[in-house]
Image: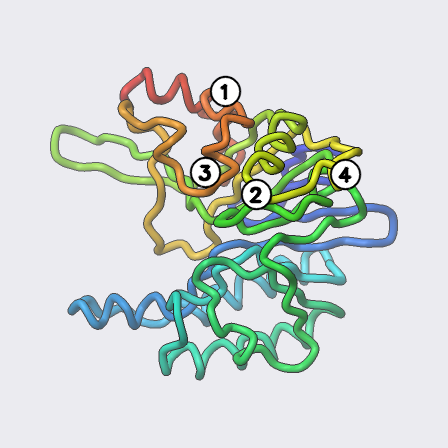
């Protein structure tokens, strides 16, 4: 298991949708979009697949053993049901976190749009943060992406989000297509984003006096079986992506670098859209 360097103290775990953030003496593992309970939604539509919780837990523990993070941060959509919780979620989520508590010192959750009533399922010792996210070490601004980030996150150089489930769709012959989860790494115009948040009443000008945000990472979903947003569709546009920051025109989506989980660089979003893959 290798690390792919994305920036200072910022590494993607090769072949995993996981980020390892580090500074001297501290390591934090970040995961997004597990959507525990997704299988029960499929079952209600006649599609039956086994629960993936055990496999996800095994992968997380493998990463933790390899790199020894002291803290785990889940970047939203831990569960799948938007409002309330299915019986499977009540059964699986508490046990999932109880097991992880054995391997790390701290666990925190930034809630996503699917995490209604999640707090009732979390065991003692798991911290529920604000949906506006968390500024980690004053350098990494972590939020799910369905809502605007808290103003203090714009003082961080790197913004990190989930929510989109970005994928690239490959055509294999006239009738067959496959998709692969990808990372998106793009420039962010922090002052422009700050102005947009003030304009929309999401922040006061006085809260945004030290804007440093210059890069945005969109994480792939940790759940391997989820669908996603095909960012290489020729007719796709910035407005078609979900989440206020990506629609704010404060990020360079067309210039976003696209990486597969193994680190392969596919080009930019704009190049992929023009190529018609």
Q: Nearer the viewer, residue 71 or 237?
A: 237
Q: Which mark is residue 206?
A: 4
**Pointer 1 local density, CA inside 10 Å: few below 14, some 14–19, many at least 20:** some
Distance between mark 4 and mark 1 Cα atoms: 31 Å
| Callout 4 secondary element | helix
Position of 63 relative to 101 (above/below): above
Q: Are marks 4 and 2 in contact (CB under 8 Å)?
A: no
Q: Is residue 117 visible?
A: yes
Distance between mark 4 and mark 2 Cα atoms: 40 Å
Which mark's residue is nearer the viewer, 3 or 4?
A: 4
Label 1, on which residue? 255
- Residue 174: quarter of image: top left
Distance between mark 3 and mark 4 Cα atoms: 36 Å
| Callout 1 secondary element | loop
| Callout 2 secondary element | loop
Q: Nearer the viewer, residue 170 or 1?
A: 170
Label 2, on which residue? 14
Point out the image quarter for the C terminus. top left
Distance between mark 3 and mark 1 Cα atoms: 15 Å
Could you say where residue 123 lies in the image, as x and y percent from the top left?
A: 61, 81
Q: Which mark is residue 182?
A: 3
Which sits earlier in the primary sequence, circle 1 or circle 2? 2
Q: What residue is drawn where x is 36% and y is 78%?
A: 86
**Pointer 3 local density, CA inside 10 Å: few below 14, some 14–19, many at least 20:** many
């Amino acid at each position: 298991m290798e690390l792919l360097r994305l920036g200072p103290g910022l590494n993607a775990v090769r072949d995993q949708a996981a980020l390892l953030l580090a500074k001297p003496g501290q390591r934090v593992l970040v995961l997004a979009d597990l959507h525990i309970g997704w299988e029960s939604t499929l079952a209600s539509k006649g599609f039956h697949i086994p629960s993936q919780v055990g496999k996800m837990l095994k992968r997380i523990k493998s990463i933790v053993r390899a790199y020894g993070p002291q803290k785990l941060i889940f970047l939203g959509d831990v569960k799948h049901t938007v409002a309330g919780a299915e019986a499977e979620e009540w059964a699986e989520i508490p046990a999932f976190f109880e097991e992880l508590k054995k391997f790390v010192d701290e666990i925190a959750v930034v809630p996503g749009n699917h995490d209604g009533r999640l707090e009732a399922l979390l065991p003692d010792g798991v911290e529920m943060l604000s949906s506006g996210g968390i500024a980690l070490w004053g350098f990494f601004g972590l939020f799910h992406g369905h809502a605007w980030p808290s103003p203090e996150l714009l003082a961080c150089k790197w913004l990190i989000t989930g929510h989109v489930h970005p994928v690239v769709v490959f055509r294999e012959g006239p009738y067959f297509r496959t998709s692969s989860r990808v990372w998106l790494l793009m420039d962010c115009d922090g002052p422009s984003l700050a102005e947009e948040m003030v304009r929309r009443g999401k922040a006061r000008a006085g809260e945004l006096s030290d804007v440093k945000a210059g890069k945005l990472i969109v994480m792939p979903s940790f759940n391997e079986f989820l669908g996603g947003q095909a960012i290489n569709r020729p007719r796709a546009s910035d407005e078609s992506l979900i989440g206020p920051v990506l629609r704010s025109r404060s990020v360079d989506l067309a210039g976003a670098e696209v990486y597969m989980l193994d680190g392969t660089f596919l080009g930019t979003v704009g190049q992929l859209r023009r190529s018609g893959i």
